[in-house]
Image (cartoon, grey):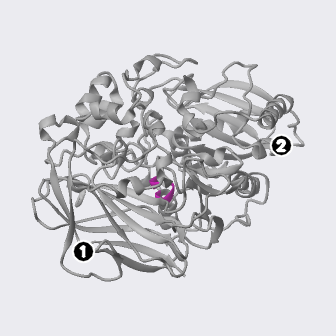
Amino acid sequence: MKKLFLLLSLLVGMTKISAQSLSVAQQDSAFVRENYVKYQYQISMRDGVKLFTNVYVPKDASANNKYPIVMQRTCYDIAPYGKDDYPQMLYYSRHMMREKFIFVEQDVRGRWMSEGTWTNMTPHIANKKVKTDVDEASDTYDTIDWLVKNIPNNNGRVGQYGISYPGFYTIAGALCGHPALKASSPQAPVSDFFFDDFHHNGAFTIGYGLTFPVFGVQHPKPTTESWYDNLFPKRNTQDGFDWYKTQTPLKNLGANYKDNFFWQEHVDHPNYDEFWQKRSIIPHLKNIKNAPAIMVVGGWYDAEDLYGPLTIYKNVEKNNQNIYNTIVMGPFGHGDWARERGHHMHSNVYFGDSVATFFQRNIELKFFKHFLKGAGDGKSDLPEAYLFDTGKKQWQEFKEWPVKTAQKVNFYLSNSGKLTDKITSDGYSEFVSDPNKPVPYTEDNKQLFGFTPRAYMSEDQRFAGRRTDVLTFETDVLTEDVTLGGEILAKLKVATTGTDADWFVKLVDVYPGDEQNTPFTPKHITLAGYQQMVRSEIMRSRFRNSFSKPEPLVPNQITDVTFRLQDVLHTFKKGHKIMIQVQSTAFPLFDINPQKYVDNIYKADAADFIKATHKVYNSSAIEVEILK
């Protein structure tokens, strides 16, 4: 299945290729063969493990025309593997490809054609003492060192990039300290699997249930063929919602993965213990030696890795002095800046034309050219933060992020159904949460069996608000534009008849009843009254005080549950309304909380799942930052 399977999420919605697109693809393929020569190497790391590496060198490289190196390290694959076989594109951007660099791709240890043992989120070793102390930073250092010494006609400067898991290898590589590494662009980087991808605030992302064969099986030896194709669960239905229901309790899903080490790691480590903590790259992003220039890239609608880019950028910014560190956030799903679709859509919402091309040509190319081919002095003509306002649908430049002058405002959740600027009474709103009837996270059944969930991040939420187990609070119709720019904090005061509960909070933009469809709105969608999700996040009550030391709720006792929803930059336009929805389940995006406290949810029995009545008190608030 190779890379095509793993990049399927980047291709969702592309059901046909126009004659013009095909012609462009043919031109790209011809350009690669006409302008680059391919070499293959097994590069030895300090512990003797050899990593398979493809190198594409411009044919016009010479002693008088040297090129910088741009490298990607990946756990997926670097096909095609034949010495005389060339990919259609080098890099994902033809602007980068045609600018010409020495492009390098490498299989990380334990994957595909590389030797060694595969580890998810390789723990970073800050103080290496012996040759066997290896991690992604040391492998990056050893690779760069070999490349600059052995690839003819390189100019001694190296850049690194990668999307998603390769984004983790990129930020880990930025810690390697090699003086030749001048530019690093971690894009949609994974940073911590307890908050990215496989968990959100400790809640298990069951929507990733089909991915475990890819990440939890060692390859028997270096290979160009997928070794996990026959290890995916058998499904006897086309209904993803119903199939995932059969995988609850989670031990049912685990029955598909008896020999899967990654699944077993989840079962053995349900809390944020040392196992997960040492796999986080975040604590190491301080006082970076020989730091390269860093440009973090993400998408506001990235269902997989939104925590990663925001958290990495902020931690690098906070804990390093005199470092070039910038952030770019566009109206993209996971990695969608890597593929130009013309009229840029996320789910049913149109954001403008050629948005990916703008990023590739005006932001990314400028970054790499400046630091790898140009002065490299940090005067790149790029802002500190290049962010897309998803309400105004336009790029904005900021000198800092978050903006220090932003006004913090609390929206209180009144049992009148209103979002208010003050606590109205001592009352509460309540609903019954039934684990046997979880709230769907989407109406789009096509994405339920996808490799990972994607489109729900901007979907219409009217279907959810019509349920009795979803609380809805909204402002009056706005009389002027309101721009939320920065962090969002849910500060809930809750009580439940159970001993555990999940809280899924959504920030929603309610369109007016006379909103007109765009020329690109899908035919079955009506934007009049559309309730566009702007941001959402889940919090598992057991982790309210500590992610490493969970504790049950006391039934019927008012309890504080506070958590972040991640940043936004979104203008709610005049005539719209701001809405908050609160529910307990979002299935099968996240697993179902039994609502009866058990020490390990992965080992829960069916009898542990109980109905519970949840109360959300009027003193609950959503804290936002408003830009003036």
Q: Position of residue 19 (x, y in %)?
A: 80, 33
Position of 180 compared to 233: left or right? right
Contact, mark 1 vs mark 2 (Cβ under 8 Å): no
Provide the major secondary structure of the magenta segment. Answer: helix
Query: Where residue 574 appears, x then y in whole percent?
Result: 55, 76
Tag on residue 618?
1
Q: Is residue 144 above or below residue 116?
A: below
Rendered location of residue 411, percent (x, y)? 36, 76
Q: Residue 607: x and y, percent?
A: 12, 37
Residue 260: quadrant of the picture: top left
Q: Is residue 308 magenta?
A: yes
Q: Nearer the viewer, residue 461 or 543?
A: 461
Q: Is residue 615 visible?
A: yes
Q: Is residue 393 above or below residue 59?
A: below
Nearest the eye: 33 or 131: 33
Task: Look at the image and tell me in which quarter the N terminus lies.
Answer: top right
Kind of residue sitting beneath label 2: Lys
Q: Which mark is residue 66?
A: 2
Residue found farthest to the front: 514
The residue stretch that appears in magenta: 306-311
Q: Is residue 311 left or right of residue 544?
A: right
**Under tag 2, what secondary structure?**
loop
How crowded is the residue under tag 2: few (<14 C-alpha within 10 Å), some, or many (20+)? some
